[in-house]
Image (spheres, rainbow, N blue to C red):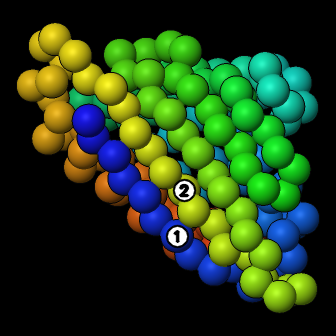
């Protein structure tokens, strides 16, 4: 099963960091594979995000996700509901004093049947996606978020 995880510390209070990541529409600003994304409601369990991600040859692939866990200032978990892969996307948040937050971003996907043959490219894509967490840190710390 392909997985990728990255943790960074962001010099912003936990409520600001949580709000940024919980609104998954912000992911288009820092995740390189997200071409476009819209929300069907405010962040909460059951909220669906319609997104298009970059596929082979740069073509757009639907990759909609739904929030399945929402714990304010602690965690957000989403599961894929459309597209060829149905990954689990999770964010966890830990305060570091009063002015910083440790964020962990994880991706994982169960591959079965012929999809197992794609585990190498899927792993490479996931690794690239979690590395975008550094771009999110810069957005939040510079006030551009």
Q: Secondary structure at mark 2?
A: strand
Which residue is found at the position 13% from the left and 13% from the top?
114
**Contact? badges 1 and 2 (CB < 8 Å):** yes
Q: Determine whether, in the image, residue 111 is placed left or right of residue 67.
A: left
Q: Secondary structure at mark 1?
A: strand
Give x and y (percent) for residue 113: 16, 11
Query: Which quarter of the figure is the C terminus placed in?
Result: bottom right
Q: Count the marks.
A: 2
| Res 33 → quadrant | top left
Q: Quick one: label 2, few (<14), some, or many (20+) residues within 10 Å?
A: many
Q: For the view shown, which residue lies furthest in the left direction?
A: 117
N-term-proximal mark, 1 vs 2: 1
| Res 85 → quadrant | top left
> In the image, is residue 116 above or below residue 142?
above
| Res 2 → quadrant | top left
Residue at mark 1 to residue at mark 2: CA–CA distance? 6 Å
Q: Which residue is mark 2?
A: 105
Residue 96 in view (yes/no): yes
> In the image, is residue 145 above or below residue 20?
below
Q: Nearer the viewer, residue 16 or 98?
A: 98
Query: Which quarter of the figure is the N terminus placed in?
Result: top left
Give x and y (percent) for residue 13: 86, 76
Give x and y (percent) for residue 76: 71, 44
Q: Which residue is mark 1?
A: 7
Which residue is found at the position 66% from the left and 57% from the top?
92
Give x and y (percent) for residue 104: 57, 62
Residue 143 in view (yes/no): no
Q: Determine whether, in the image, residue 2 is placed left or right of residue 43.
A: left
Which residue is found at the position 36% from the left and 32% from the top?
109
Residue 42's disc is none
Which residue is found at the position 71% from the left and 29% from the top?
67
Q: Determine whether, in the image, residue 30 is placed left or right of residue 128.
A: right
């Amino acid at each position: 099963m392909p997985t990728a995880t990255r943790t960074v510390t962001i010099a912003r209070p936990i409520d600001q960091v949580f709000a940024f990541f919980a609104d998954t529409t912000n992911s288009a600003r820092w995740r390189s594979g997200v071409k476009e994304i819209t929300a069907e409601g405010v962040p909460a369990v059951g909220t669906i995000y319609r997104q298009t991600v970059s596929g082979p040859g740069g073509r757009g692939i639907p990759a909609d996700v739904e929030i399945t866990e929402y714990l304010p200032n602690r965690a957000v978990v989403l599961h894929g509901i459309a597209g060829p892969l149905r990954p689990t996307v999770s964010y966890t948040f830990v305060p570091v004093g009063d002015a910083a937050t440790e964020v962990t971003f994880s991706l994982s996907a169960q591959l079965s049947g012929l999809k197992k043959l794609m585990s190498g490219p899927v792993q490479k894509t996931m690794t690239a996606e979690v590395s975008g967490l550094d771009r999110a840190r810069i957005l939040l710390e510079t006030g551009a978020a």
